[in-house]
Image (cartoon, grey):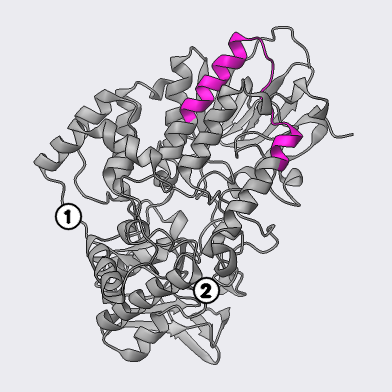
């Protein structure tokens, strides 16, 4: 690796113009980096530009689903709902870009196909679709974790004569569903938001369910002027509490185990947090719903009871009750009157676990010997999460090693930020970063990166690169933290994407860090206090495997 100064087009190139890309661009400009953000989409927003399906909204509350670093943005932006719609989040991100004058350093419609590291020059060359190349010292992925969609592996999809649409590729001009026969495959977070939104307007609605979810229902009141004032006055404290919380939210961690209180007290707590709605149930009831199977099962039975109370048809209610895994066995989705939708007479839940879908025909979906005739088929079948955006680009590091090949046998990184063999490639929300409300680790990660790059530049250290030792340590810590949770035993049964279970051929390991966001941030601070030694592979004989 040469120490000579090489002229590049930019000091840093950030891939992505969503939450991550905007935060990184802002903070790198603050330290004087000549930075460009590129995004293949036609607009700013990242995941929120891509995901426009009916009902799309946050499942975290607005005060901490936003940035804290700009007082101007905090004072001037006004949220309208407790859980903002996708359209409102998109408006917010565009407001951030305009208010902080970020747009001048963003290129849209610039799709990255390949990035290649030149060790001699210590430079990354970024290849855009269409043939243009750009050079940079630092290459940073802000591509996000939920934008590489997966289609269901069901034969016959190409034969369907109706309209076929993926939730993550929803047409920007919408889909006419009024009075139509509509089918839905996929009941993760997207499908759960779609169901109650479109159910009132469609003619017939067939919801094909392979596995039910434990859904924490919530309400979505409008944000009052008084509430917005209070949030602005206490924003620093709100964000400080969110940053210190394992899940990155402004909530009070529970003090007791579900097993330490009487049955009556446990029921009272469950009921109060269910009424409060959303992640309050998952995070504030008891301190072991994610780590103790018995406690998790108590929460499971409470939610099953709620389902049976809400859904009028007993057979449908039982189909909606998860029996194969317990609460927190996979990511807990928030619902907005999801269960109520199944009380509508034209909404039918089709059990495709007992009798699987065999094929998609010209007319619709075939389950066993029955063909459900459809005008529109929606696939809300999720994403190749955490790694998909990175492995779908040819990222070529030292000695021609491709990142997808490095990870073929399992993810290896230091804190989900840097990989050995890929100098000056940094990841925002890389695989095995915290299971969290995402804007919190995005902002903290962008600020950490800016401090790290500034340190390396001021001290003349040519490359940020994880040591092999740090990769091994982090893999062991991710595995340890994951095995301490209910998801380790239940996630495989639940086919959880956190465990890579939703993608055929993907390595079966934890895709996220389950040890708590506040623990993860302390690891990051420790690395910084240590002079980033675990990110200085060139100082070590480990820089290259023998």
Q: Mark 1 points at which residue?
A: 221
Report the Cα–Cα distance between label 2 and label 1. 40 Å
Q: Would you say the residues marked 2 and 1 are in contact, meaning their CB atoms lie under 8 Å apart? A: no
Residue depicted at x 74% and y 26%: 537
Is 193 drawn above or below residue 305 in the view shown? above
> Which image quadrant: the N terminus?
top right
From the viewer's perspective, is 221 left or right of 534? Answer: left
**What is the crowding at mark 2: few (fewer than 14 residues within 10 Å), some, or many (at least 20)?**
some
Q: Mark 2 points at which residue?
A: 160
Q: Where is residue 17 in the image (x, y as percent from the top left)?
A: 45, 34
Q: Main secondary structure of the magenta part?
A: helix
Which residue occupies the foreground of this view, 508 or 13? Answer: 508
Answer with the quarter of the image where residue 336 lies. bottom left
> Which image quadrant: the C terminus?
top right
**What is the crowding at mark 1: few (fewer than 14 residues within 10 Å), some, or many (at least 20)?**
few
Q: Which mark is residue 101?
A: none
Residue placed farthest to the top in the image?
Answer: 4
Is 311 drawn above or below residue 144 in the view shown? below
Determine whether the residue tagged by mark 1 lies in a helix, strand or loop.
Answer: loop
Which residue occupies the foreground of this view, 20 or 232? Answer: 232
Is 119 drawn above or below residue 220 in the view shown? above
Residue placed farthest to the right in the image?
Answer: 546
Q: Position of residue 342 (x, y in %)?
A: 30, 79
Determine whether the residue tagged by mark 2 lies in a helix, strand or loop.
Answer: loop
Residue 292 part of the magenta segment: no
Q: Where is residue 306 in the image (x, y as percent from the top left)?
A: 29, 77
Magenta span: 446-472
From the viewer's perspective, is 339 left or right of 380? Answer: left
**Residue 203 appears anywhere in the view:** no
Residue 455 part of the magenta segment: yes
Residue depicted at x 26% and y 62%: 273
Which residue occupies the foreground of this view, 179 or 16? Answer: 16
């Amino acid at each position: 690796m040469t120490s000579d100064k090489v002229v590049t087009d930019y000091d840093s190139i950030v891939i992505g113009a969503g939450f991550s890309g905007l935060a990184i661009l802002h903070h790198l400009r603050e330290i004087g980096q000549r930075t460009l953000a590129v995004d293949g989409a036609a607009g700013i927003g990242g995941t929120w530009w891509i995901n426009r399906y009916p009902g799309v909204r946050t499942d975290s509350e607005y005060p901490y689903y936003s940035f804290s670093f700009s007082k101007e943005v905090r004072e001037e932006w006004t949220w309208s709902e407790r859980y903002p719609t996708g359209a409102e989040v998109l408006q917010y991100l565009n407001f951030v870009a305009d208010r902080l004058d970020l747009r001048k350093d963003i290129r849209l419609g610039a799709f990255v196909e390949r990035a290649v590291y030149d060790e001699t020059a210590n430079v990354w060359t970024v290849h855009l679709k269409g043939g243009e190349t750009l050079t940079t010292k630092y290459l940073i992925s802000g591509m996000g974790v939920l934008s590489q969609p997966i289609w269901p592996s069901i034969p016959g999809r190409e034969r369907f004569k109706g309209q076929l649409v993926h939730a993550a590729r929803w047409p920007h001009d919408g889909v006419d569903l009024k009075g139509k026969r509509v089918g839905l495959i996929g009941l993760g977070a997207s499908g759960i938001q779609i169901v109650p939104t479109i159910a009132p307007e469609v003619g017939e609605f067939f919801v094909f369910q392979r596995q039910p979810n434990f859904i924490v229902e919530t309400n979505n009141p409008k944000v009052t002027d008084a509430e917005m004032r209070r949030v602005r006055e206490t924003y620093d404290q709100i964000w400080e509490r969110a940053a210190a919380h394992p899940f990155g939210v402004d909530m009070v961690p529970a003090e007791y185990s579900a097993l330490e209180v009487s049955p009556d007290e446990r029921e009272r707590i469950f009921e109060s947090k269910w009424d409060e709605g959303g992640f309050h149930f998952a995070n504030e009831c008891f301190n072991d719903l994610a780590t103790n199977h018995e406690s998790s099962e108590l929460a499971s039975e409470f939610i099953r009871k709620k389902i049976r109370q809400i859904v009028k048809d007993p057979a449908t209610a039982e189909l909606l009750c998860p029996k194969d895994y317990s609460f927190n066995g996979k990511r807990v989705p928030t619902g907005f009157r999801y269960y109520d939708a199944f009380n509508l007479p034209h909404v039918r839940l089709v059990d495709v676990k007992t009798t699987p879908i065999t094929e998609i025909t010209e007319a619709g979906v075939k389950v066993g010997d029955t063909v459900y005739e459809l005008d529109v088929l929606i696939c809300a079948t999720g994403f190749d999460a955490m790694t998909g955006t990175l492995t779908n680009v040819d990222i070529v590091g030292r000695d021609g090693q491709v990142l997808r090949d490095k990870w073929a046998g399992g993810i290896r990184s230091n804190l989900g930020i840097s990989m050995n063999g890929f100098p000056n490639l940094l990841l925002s929300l890389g695989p095995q970063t915290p299971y969290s409300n995402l804007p919190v680790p995005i902002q903290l990660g962008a600020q950490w990166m800016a401090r790290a790059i500034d340190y390396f530049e001021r001290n003349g250290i040519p490359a940020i690169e994880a040591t092999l030792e740090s990769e091994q340590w982090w893999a062991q810590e991710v595995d340890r933290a994951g095995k301490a949770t209910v998801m380790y035993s239940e996630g495989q049964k639940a086919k959880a994407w956190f465990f890579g279970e939703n993608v055929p051929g993907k390595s079966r390991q934890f895709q996220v860090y389950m040890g708590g966001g506040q623990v993860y941030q302390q690891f990051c601070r420790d690395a910084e206090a240590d002079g980033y030694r675990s990110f200085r592979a060139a100082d070590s004989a480990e820089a290259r495997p023998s």
